[in-house]
Amino acid sequence: MIPYYIVIRYIVSRYIVRRYKGQVEKKDNPMSKQPQNKHLPLTEATYYILLALVTPKHGYAVMQEAEQISAGTVRLAPGTLYGAFTTLEENKLITMVGKEERRKIYQITERGIQVLLGQVDRLRIMLKRAEERGELILAESVQEGKK
């Protein structure tokens, strides 16, 4: 499996930088064919929060699941999490579905699911473009050679 940081470095160097320098035409942009969503792209923390809330959970459970499903790459602090909950609830991407003592239980909404699926599509496109270019295989073999 390709390490996450290599994919991100590749995407930034090959697509994002060229796009803002005007080297990539709009017609070459796979995202130009998709309807625009004001919530996309999601931050990594927001992506994992929404993914964790596919089933109802309280804040601490979301923090634990986000860390688990991100293979330890994302650790949400309480301030980050509850700030995100407020924003996501205002944007109707999540909703509070109950309370247990002091714990509020949240779940993703239908709108939130659509945004999450849009982000997954974006990630698939990025990964597909990266895999189409043999440079990633070369970069991965160079990284392995350094270990």
Image (spheres, rainbow, N blue to C red):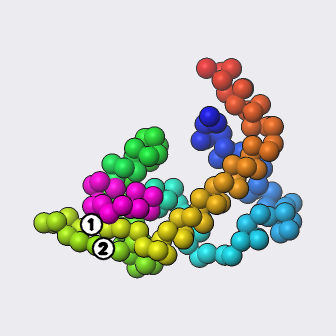
The three-letter code of the residue at mark 2 reads: Met
Q: Kindly indicate whether the residue at mark 2 contacts the one at mark 1 (C-beta within 8 angstroms).
A: yes
Q: Percent position (x, y) of residue 88? A: 42, 72
Q: Secondary structure at mark 2?
A: strand
Tell me: 136 left or right of 27.
left
Q: Is residue 10 above or below residue 45?
A: above
Question: Residue at 40% across / 51% down in the picture?
Answer: 66
The vertical placement of 146 against 107, above or below, is above
Q: Does 68 sit above or below residue 55?
A: above
Does 59 appear in magenta? Answer: yes
Residue at image mark 1: 105
**Around disc 2, counting alpha carbons within 10 Å, would you say few (fewer than 14), some (14 to 19), or many (20 or more)?**
some
**Which residue is pictured at 27% across the width and 66% down the height?**
105
State the extent of the magenta-drawn residues as a range: 50-62
Residue 30: image location, x then y, percent: 77, 63
Looking at the rendering, which quadrant does residue 57 occupy? bottom left
Identity of the residue drawn at 80% across and 45% down: 132
Q: CA distance from mark 1 to mark 2?
A: 6 Å
Counting from the top left corner in percent of width and height, residue 86 is at: 36, 73
Is 146 covered by the magenta stretch? no
Residue type highlighted by circle 1 = Ile
* Quarter the C terminus occupies: top right
- Tell me the residue that label 2 is attached to: 96
Q: Position of residue 5 (x, y in %)?
A: 61, 41
Relative side of 44 to 104, left or right? right
Residue at position x 59%, y 41% in the image: 4
Count of marks placed on residues: 2
